[in-house]
Image (tube, coloured by chain):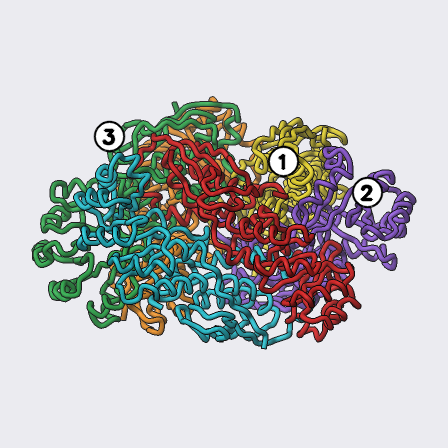
Chain colours: A orange, B green, C cyan, D red, E yellow, F purple
Amino acid sequence: MAGPELHPLIYERVLRVAFEEDLGRVGDITTDAVVSAGVHGEAAMIARKSGTVAGLGIARSAFQLYEPALVVGLVAHDGDRVEAGAVLATVAGPVRGILTGERIALNLSGRLSGIATATRSMVDAVAGTGTRVVCTRKTTPGLRALEKYAVRAGGGSNHRFGLDDAVLIKDNHIAIAGSITKALTRVKRSVGHLVKVEVEVDTLGQLEELLKVGADAVLLDNMDPEVLAQAVAMVKGRLITEASGGITPETARVKAESGVDLLSVGWLTHSAPILDIGLDIA
Amino acid sequence: MAGPELHPLIYERVLRVAFEEDLGRVGDITTDAVVSAGVHGEAAMIARKSGTVAGLGIARSAFQLYEPALVVGLVAHDGDRVEAGAVLATVAGPVRGILTGERIALNLSGRLSGIATATRSMVDAVAGTGTRVVCTRKTTPGLRALEKYAVRAGGGSNHRFGLDDAVLIKDNHIAIAGSITKALTRVKRSVGHLVKVEVEVDTLGQLEELLKVGADAVLLDNMDPEVLAQAVAMVKGRLITEASGGITPETARVKAESGVDLLSVGWLTHSAPILDIGLDIA
Amino acid sequence: MAGPELHPLIYERVLRVAFEEDLGRVGDITTDAVVSAGVHGEAAMIARKSGTVAGLGIARSAFQLYEPALVVGLVAHDGDRVEAGAVLATVAGPVRGILTGERIALNLSGRLSGIATATRSMVDAVAGTGTRVVCTRKTTPGLRALEKYAVRAGGGSNHRFGLDDAVLIKDNHIAIAGSITKALTRVKRSVGHLVKVEVEVDTLGQLEELLKVGADAVLLDNMDPEVLAQAVAMVKGRLITEASGGITPETARVKAESGVDLLSVGWLTHSAPILDIGLDIA
Amino acid sequence: MAGPELHPLIYERVLRVAFEEDLGRVGDITTDAVVSAGVHGEAAMIARKSGTVAGLGIARSAFQLYEPALVVGLVAHDGDRVEAGAVLATVAGPVRGILTGERIALNLSGRLSGIATATRSMVDAVAGTGTRVVCTRKTTPGLRALEKYAVRAGGGSNHRFGLDDAVLIKDNHIAIAGSITKALTRVKRSVGHLVKVEVEVDTLGQLEELLKVGADAVLLDNMDPEVLAQAVAMVKGRLITEASGGITPETARVKAESGVDLLSVGWLTHSAPILDIGLDIA
Amino acid sequence: MAGPELHPLIYERVLRVAFEEDLGRVGDITTDAVVSAGVHGEAAMIARKSGTVAGLGIARSAFQLYEPALVVGLVAHDGDRVEAGAVLATVAGPVRGILTGERIALNLSGRLSGIATATRSMVDAVAGTGTRVVCTRKTTPGLRALEKYAVRAGGGSNHRFGLDDAVLIKDNHIAIAGSITKALTRVKRSVGHLVKVEVEVDTLGQLEELLKVGADAVLLDNMDPEVLAQAVAMVKGRLITEASGGITPETARVKAESGVDLLSVGWLTHSAPILDIGLDIA
Amino acid sequence: MAGPELHPLIYERVLRVAFEEDLGRVGDITTDAVVSAGVHGEAAMIARKSGTVAGLGIARSAFQLYEPALVVGLVAHDGDRVEAGAVLATVAGPVRGILTGERIALNLSGRLSGIATATRSMVDAVAGTGTRVVCTRKTTPGLRALEKYAVRAGGGSNHRFGLDDAVLIKDNHIAIAGSITKALTRVKRSVGHLVKVEVEVDTLGQLEELLKVGADAVLLDNMDPEVLAQAVAMVKGRLITEASGGITPETARVKAESGVDLLSVGWLTHSAPILDIGLDIA
């Protein structure tokens, strides 16, 4: 994986909300009734399918938020490709903590690993082209920082984290401003030196207008591979080029071969199935 | 749809977190720069694919939390089946509010409609059998109340909301207690009169043991349709019967025809793709 | 006590709010001025009156939230009957922590022990009848999970935790629906398989109607013992029977002897006096 | 009532927590199923017993937080004495809002009115003596501001709101410091000009020491009326005098006739039963 | 002012905390006692000194959070230069709301206007040079979004909002990595396409190394104007150049005349005095 | 320093918000990329200027909230006067934690030390006069408890913490009530025995009226030293006397020599520059 693990201060609120939600007003009435407080044991988090994992450190935090006495050892690490049956982590200590923490640990690591796996397959599909796979703002409300982290774990890269960290002038903005030029003029008055400006274009004509005014990046929306290649040729490296619109593992390579810098794929975060991870008690 | 809409007090925190996440430290720097505060306009939420919708009232709340002056009219209602191209809602008022609120409104309604659509297809697959489709605790952390609501909107029914509102004795509990009978004995000492007790069994032998001790429901895990039918026959209506394990739209009907009362499907909430919903500015 | 202790994640917010409230903007200005940071000492939580205790583990959490270095040993346990003068717990460590944490620890354990004591006296009053004592939703805002826990510690059982975990059709619902039958019909369309349905009836005529339609439980409100007995006879075990309305330790036994399954008593949580618990510095 | 109503910003968090607690993960499943969204109606909050009311404005806020369309008219006002059967407030609008908001509105106003009623009976018991009735820090965690407000509504007065707004040197502080004089010396080094200093004494000998050093107030703990009178005579108005320890409506007058300025009564907030308030649908 | 107003969702938490802090456990006991609820009046926010204003819309939100019936009219707007005595806003409605909201409204607008005024004086000092004035992360904990907004209102521009939205390799990073080149190599492996990379250099030798490896921007720390000019000459526009270190209104122009793109000034947010704003009741 | 350190429960929320603000959605992307998780090191917090320090314990909490493994040793203590170059604290452990926690630790301790330094210079200016220096409610929203603590660390004393802990009748209150006497009459009906009452007067005539009615303290606003001396003479120790209005280190002594008990200085908290504190890696 390219980058480091997320710091717990960034996701602690997510874990607390998850436990509030799951413990409700009484707690785990099954485990608390059946298992005595003193019973200790061991368990392993196992990948039921092959894939790329993410969120194992977060799963560890989940177990330990509920039961600080649990010892969680990570066998795999975020970004690793694993085979079905692989042990991802071991959990040892009070069995109540293992059984009650299980679902939240699995819900989070399963979802994030699903995103990492989807990203990895997309990254593999474009391997060697030099094109990067990036995600969008189509994330689960409340989980954006984690889901964008999972994309990085899968070998992808992040686009905007919110509405505030980059400008993206879309079709509706252009329509309201009257033209790309007018929209850009308004934006350039207020934008700081760290903020990059990207403009969405649907046609080569629009791209031509954009190249005259200048920006940092262009979003080439829903273009066929050939048009995409023409666009890249027109840009001549003056802008970062990004393709978007219905990109799947099947179509990714063809699009990437147009030479675009980035493929942005909403599907990674809004529709990737989980990676099935289970917990086996030793 | 079977039930009423969720009350905003139940999901207001989700909306606030979503806006914190998306507005960041400055807000929508593109829209605020390009669109003047006084510009008014109209837009429509449109289903890009056919499906069953959920979360339209929540989308309305999202728009209005950001811009109270927006008037949102629901054309479709949660639980409705819609065709691709159908107008789901109209939004009128300050354009800034429409463009900035768009992503959160669509992220939520898209996800919830995806769940409703998945549920509906499963419910349709078992139509006429008398079997109900239920969800699990495999939900997105922080969104459980909303995702369970989406299952209801899709015609499904809810299983436990947390670890506290029903007993579910699983294989690990039985292993630790020593037997189904011992686990049940422990549980019955503490459980209130409103709480139903369910036990997971993997074999007909275990079912036999359970039937002697008694409970409210049995989870028949990973059984073939024929074994399932035998189990249902053994139970003779004394317990609610629930089948789980790898149930897909393809296998659902066969499993339902065994006569089980419930099919529980984790996939509805952990892996259903979104329903693609877009916003068109008029 | 029947069940296990509440997990700290369920009441941590209550403790934090309690300390915010009590420390205010400066903290314990008396103790901080009079007692040096280095002074260590010991103290004991003592029952000033006899009763049944609850909340001792919560008191321990309170002391340790303020001063992690405090060692708190529980001598009695939630659900224990204790005599006046009994040592309930010992606290050893920095004296500042003992003196500043004292009031919150005692406010919580005193209130919860008061509820447990009231419950226990009610449970004792009906001992041998087979009737269970249950609480209501008439709890202190913000403390419901804790107060319901105290009822369990006192040997009682819990009714609904909220408006969402069981159906209770009351007189006003029936009036608006037009009849018990109509109200039940509406409810049964939306209710999940885990949710029990209870109906309040004031007369035997209403009970008769209810028995025809069917439900899980009946609330027999404000009935004399003889009428209650008639009602129980009519029900013949087909419904869980619950009596409510002005039940006191004096009247409880007579009502219980009617054979009802449950006596529900709002008084346990809304009007029970605290159990006086004090802290003696060694 | 002596003072003005509490501002909603002070108790809004209490209301939100109360609704989270009661609505849970689905909301009011009974009312939502039985009563259509469009049904309007009227109801009245009625005192079932005579007493002094408090928290009616808070009850109104509770109804309106859940359903802004409800119109709540206050017929009685906080601090009013009311007879059994008196109408305290009217509520008109969507019936769902009336039925779902009912319990939280009644739980809060019942508890606060119980405190106001207990305070009023104590204040009446000492009428004409010039002694004021004050409360303590023995309040319900999370509700201190509201319960202290209810004491004011009942004609009482407030003691410290927390550990930070006045100094109270108690027996344990004195024991640790070595003497009253030493404890006071330490305190006076750090205390601001707005903060009053009170010292607890158990004997007239201690009082004598205190009078030499000087303070703002003295807490005369657990003294018989005659000793109390002697203490008041010794003080000669140089300190505010406060009596505490087992003060009941029966013993209050005798204690007050000793001439003490204040009677402090923990019972008002930790053990007063609620005032029974009900809701009648018109 | 360059940009638009901050959206209330971004600062609502600040306002709530401010009122919690100021209302405490009772509210405004002076105003509530002296002024009847029905008294209406008018007031004006007045600049007591000349300067550049910021936070007027936030002041309006503060008044209206406490008293929604207050009508607040903005006479000046964020970014305006005003003279001493200028009316900035009018407030009309319940006098209790005016007097209780006053301090929070003035504390916020005074502080933000102080920052805007300091920024404006710095911007004026470099007028005509093409150099922009930017702020740092040396902001008040909890108020960063607001203080950075005030810098924009004063004509300045924003640097990083946090540790996550741009890379800034400082001296300590370089020391640990071993060299600028090594530090940059590590960074470039993980950074997204929207994130700019800046490196701090103290000498022209370091700058030379940096120019070989390449980055987006260079922070020229604590350089004399002549060295700064040399550095700018060496860069030849290939990097954004930023000067930092002890920049005051007196030294700003000389530094700017070196041709650097940005002057970053911590003083704007960590040490600027407030702009004195008062409230006059009509 | 006069008093003890603030308890972490009082400022923990401030630290969490500060880290949310600074870590954003990814964390410290520079340090995480450049410095490996295993690298350990040492650093020292150094005063770059001479002054009086405050907030060193809070800085320690900041470092340890982010990285519990950091060992922070305080060399100086809150309230100490330090020279430029003095080591205030040492930090040892994982270098990532040192570099990422640095800014928040310095932002807080720099601001609080700035307030302590300003207070100390004011206290020194009036040394020997018996006059105390007090702060106002003109504090940074969200930081009041910390800033008032810094004033105590600097040798000053605190005025009101909020609107609820003392009465301050100002000019506007008097204008609305009609006279000082009328305003005081209204206040005395509701005020508790711990709450002191202060009245602002602008003239000796007003003071005369106030002395007839009586109160605890008088705020002598904007009076010249001679008038102030006359006022003090009129009061003859019957009230606490406080002078306010444009008090600077230069004018403080003259004002204090009038014999007033308190000088209140808003400038300490709203406009004091920070004390420059840096972090040097060993």
Dot 2 alpha-carbon crowd within 10 angstroms: few under 14, some 14 to 19, many 20 or more: many
Give me the C-alpha separation between circle 3 and circle 1: 52 Å
- Look at discs 2 and 3 and give the one toward the viewer: 2
Q: Nearer the viewer, residue C257 or F15?
A: C257
Q: Does residue E105 appear in this view?
A: no
Dot 1 alpha-carbon crowd within 10 angstroms: few under 14, some 14 to 19, many 20 or more: many
Q: Tell me the number on the disc at residue A35.
A: none
User: Does the residue at mark 1 contact the one at mark 2 (Cβ under 8 Å)?
Assistant: no
Percent position (x, y) of residue B156? 23, 43
Which quadrant of the figure has residue D216?
bottom right
Residue bearing the label numbered 1? E97
Q: Tell me the number on the disc at residue B83.
A: 3
Percent position (x, y) of residue F110? 68, 55
Residue bearing the label numbered 2? F210
Quarter placement of the N terminus of chain E: top right
Identified by mark 2, the residue type is Leu
* Residue at the (39%, 26%) spot, across then down: B43
Asked whether, in this view, residue A99 is left or right of residue D55, the answer is left
Percent position (x, y) of residue F201? 81, 40
User: Which chain is indicated by disc 2?
Assistant: F
User: SS for tag 2?
Assistant: helix
User: SS for tag 1?
Assistant: helix
* Residue at the (44%, 33%) spot, across then down: D70
* Residue at the (52%, 44%) spot, across then down: D55
